[in-house]
Amino acid sequence: MSANERLDAKGYGTYEFASDDFTFAYDENEKIIYKSYTASSYLADVLHAFLKNKGAVIGFIVIVIIAILALVGPMMNEHTYKSIIIEHASLVPRVPFLENFGIFDGVYKGSNQYLDKGFTDIYYWFGSDPQGRDIWTRVWEGTRISLIIAFTAVCIDIFIGMIYGLISGYFGGKVDMVMQRFAEILNGIPTLVVVTLLGLILPRGVTSIIFALMITGWIGMSRIARAQVLKLKEQEFILASKTLGAQHFRIIFKDILPNIFGQIIIMSMFSIPNAIFTEAFLSFVGLGVPAPMASLGSLISEGYKSLTTYPHVIVAPIVVLALLMLSFNLFADGLRDAFDPKMKQM
Amino acid sequence: MSEKKDKKDRVLSIRDLDISFDTSNGVVKAIRGVRLDLFKGETIAIVGESGSGKSVTVKAIMGILASNGHIDNGSITFFDEGKAIDLVKMKPKDIRYNYCGKKIAMVFQDPMTSLDPTMTIGRQIMEPILEHLKVSHQEAKNRAMELLELVGIENPQKRFKQYPHQLSGGMRQRVVIAIALSCDPQILICDEPTTALDVTIQAKILELIKDIQYKKNISVIYITHDLGVVAKVADYVAVMYAGKIIEKGNIDEIFYDPRHPYTWGLLSSMPDVDTDSHRLFAIPGSCPNLLERVEGDAFAPRNPYALKIDFKVEPPIFDVGGQHRVASWLCHPNAPKVEMPEQLRKRIDKMLKEVRG
Amino acid sequence: MGKYITKRVLIAIFTLLVILFVLFVMLDKMPGSPFNDEKLTADQLALLNAKYGLDQPFMIRFINYVKCVIKFDFGVSYNIQKNLAVSSMLATRLPISIQIGLQAMVVGTIIGMLLGIIAALKRNTWIDTLCTGISVLGVSVPSYVIALGLAYFVGFKLGWFPILYNASKPFISTIMPTMALSLSPIANIARFTRSEMIEVLNSDYVLLAQSKGIKQYKLIINHVLRNTLISIITVMGPLLVGLLTGSMVIEKIFSIPGLGYLMVQAIQNNDYNVVMACAFIYSFLYIFVMLIVDILYGIIDPRIRVAKEGE
């Protein structure tokens, strides 16, 4: 005890040794059970980092809500995206219950449009357009089409881009040279020009827009895939599989694909808002989906015509578009930060 | 060991240093109660696994801790021409402006990334000279040329105007050393200066640092996990584990009479061409997560010789004679006698024979 | 360096030729003929075809087409302004589009860089949050939504600036379009500058520069900004694409008599000659600017400027 107190053990001066303190904690034959200090797996880490990012979580929730509304929204009332009731043209939004609070009460320039025309129990939640169509139905129908276009285009992009990049990077040499020059030239043509020209020659419709989006969209994906392959190719485990005589195909799909998965997901989350935006652009210059079909772009383009007289027509599609773009960007940002180990502290 | 002599020659003394980092997962206690002395002209090596707090300690000396790190306790006293200055009480910025590069300089681990890719070698060497020494541009340039020559770079005129990417890894590390030496520092800190280099170049760089140390009589702190490097250069060794120094002493004490089971592990894992057994020893497990409060000895869960008390009370520092200090309950008089593993004993005996006979 | 520039120029020229070829094929395959007057007999048609060289083999016609394009001859407009030379239409519209584009790029680059630098230096403070917020908003909201908002609130409700282009007040009329158009470069450059600068701040060479004990402002100017700004040049090219796309829509919204509006009109009126000419001019501008950006990057970054010399 006295020996202990002479030592410079801070705060342990009062500790009374127990009788068995100086016996071994482990039996000679007993194996040490190592406590695992890195218990959380990579994916759990990513999830944890993602959930800590409030913006990203909110973005994700908003995307889910919009997607659900895009599915069920058009079925929530009796209107369809093309049903026209001419007497109901250009009505401003009116929502039951909320109308009692002085908002969404159908009042346009001081008088209640609905009551003026005697529609006591008719409600257009987002109002109606100058042709007498329900904007609520059209907005969600349009959102659905915009989302379908964006998702399909991005999926095809991933598919083509990955295959192109993997082949180019994996085989290297002349194959890589030729493939990279080709991509470089295609990339040298502004997307705008490609999309416009394709819009001109193809029949107007969803398929054409997807095709136009797809033709340049894959290049970015292929770059990621190629860069990753080049990096991984030098690493030992690929070398190991090669010496073990694994087939090219097997190496690409079993060893390389899982490693580039994260980046591809992030990239596609950034591509979706881009595709939505390009679709909106095409509609705005008159190359969008044919009427009476709706997409977010075509709705904005229509609403623009009556911007100064009936601004409510354009508000809903613009808000949904902006929310969608914002949410996807926030979500993608959050994903990237979660996947990116560089952001780790210390 | 007389106290008076110590005070006279001491250039740096660290006392009870505690450093923690605020991370998104909580506060990490990276350094706990570190005590260390550095004497003039001597080389001290801080050894440990990655994450043991070696780099954090020296970054604290330089005032370049990451912004989420802070010193909670203790002192870092720098003896500058007879004056004792506590660096902990200074703002990091003031440490940098007054001491970094001028009195204390650092060589970093990876020469491939530690030079600015957009600035010529010459300008990067001249930068600290112009900052700290009152000299003209031409004088600074001459000095930079001399330094390039000193660190063994041929054709300094040509290299002076080149960019880092035009130099090989070994050359770049020489440039980094030239930058560190530019203002004749009293302390040179080398953070794993050779790990990123080829084996042949490693030896040359170590030789260079030793040579310069001898010429200029500076004190060197090596941070490394490579005991081979330690054996070549160090006078004094501190072994760190989980933010604590668990054993320290002069090179002979640590290499020939290690007491802490962790040091045994480290020495056993050192590659050696003529060991009887061809198997390389590895210490089981990994460094503990410092987010959790350490109960007792942090090494106990990985220690086959752990005592029951190791899980209850953190061991104090035991004086085992000479300059040798060990933080392990095994050194307590009540503890059972434990000998180092047979294999290691043989290795050390062999080494002793080689050195002495 | 010379080799690098030559390679870039060659790729640019080749890309332009590919674009011209595609345009030519499209024009060639478009339904209809320039001589669709029903009164013309087959003989007269053949004569006309011979006169304008339309009976020549495909490749010869393509070479003739390239020659015409080099002489800035894009034929005449069919629908928008009948029989007016496309080149003269372009000549009046191109300068104003370039003016607005440049204004937006300059405003966007300056404000974007400032925001990004401030955000990176004041990382994790409210300033950073604000800058990030602005840039996320700018990246997410398409420029034409901003343009519509500006047109409605600032132009229509407040009446500060003309909603539609006014030829008698050319500069005032470009303010709102420039604002709308510059938002995307502001946001993108701010984001990029911030992340790039944080990476530079965390780099080993900045740590080494810090350990040299040089003053903070010198560290920021000589090491951090220098390395950050070099990489900003790389995003300038892609941003231009956004400006091109944006300009078409924004010129339509504000009725600016520029290239973008002309192209939209041409698309809506199926005026193929004009569409093709506009597409070519857009491609040319884009490729030209990308080339300049690449060369500029090569000049500024020593890693490209000075080729690696062996040990």
Image (cartoon, coloured by chain):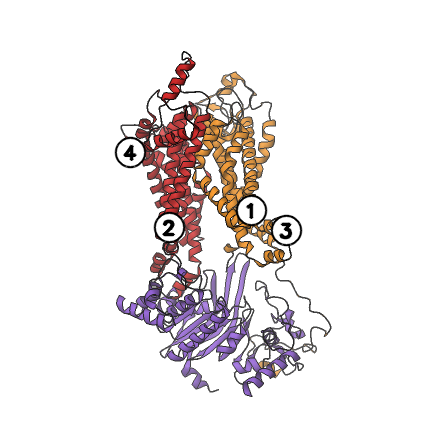
Chain colours: A orange, B purple, C red
Q: Position of residue B197 (x, y in %)?
A: 48, 67
Residue at mark 4: C171
Residue at mark 3: A247
- Cα distance between the residues tagged 4 and 2: 42 Å
Q: Amino acid at mark 1?
A: Ile
Q: Amino acid at mark 3?
A: Gln
B126 lies left or right of B354 = left
SS of the residue under disc 4: helix
In this rendered view, identify the residue nearer to me: C54 or A208: C54
Residue at mark 1: A167
Residue at 35% across / 65% down in the picture?
Answer: B159
Residue at mark 2: C3
- Cα distance between the residues tagged 3 and 2: 39 Å
Do the numbered discs 4 and 2 sit on residues whose CB atoms are within 8 Å? Answer: no
Q: Earlier in the sequence, mark 4 or mark 2?
A: 2
Q: Amino acid at mark 2?
A: Lys
Q: Amino acid at mark 4?
A: Phe
Judged by depth in the image, the label closer to the viewer, 1 or 2, is 2
Judged by depth in the image, the label closer to the viewer, 4 or 2, is 2
Residue A299 visible: no
Q: Earlier in the sequence, mark 3 or mark 1?
A: 1
Q: Position of residue A141 (x, y in %)?
A: 56, 28
- Cα distance between the residues tagged 3 and 1: 14 Å
**B340, above or below C83, in the image:** below
Farthest residue, direction top: C39
Q: What subunit carries mark 3?
A: A
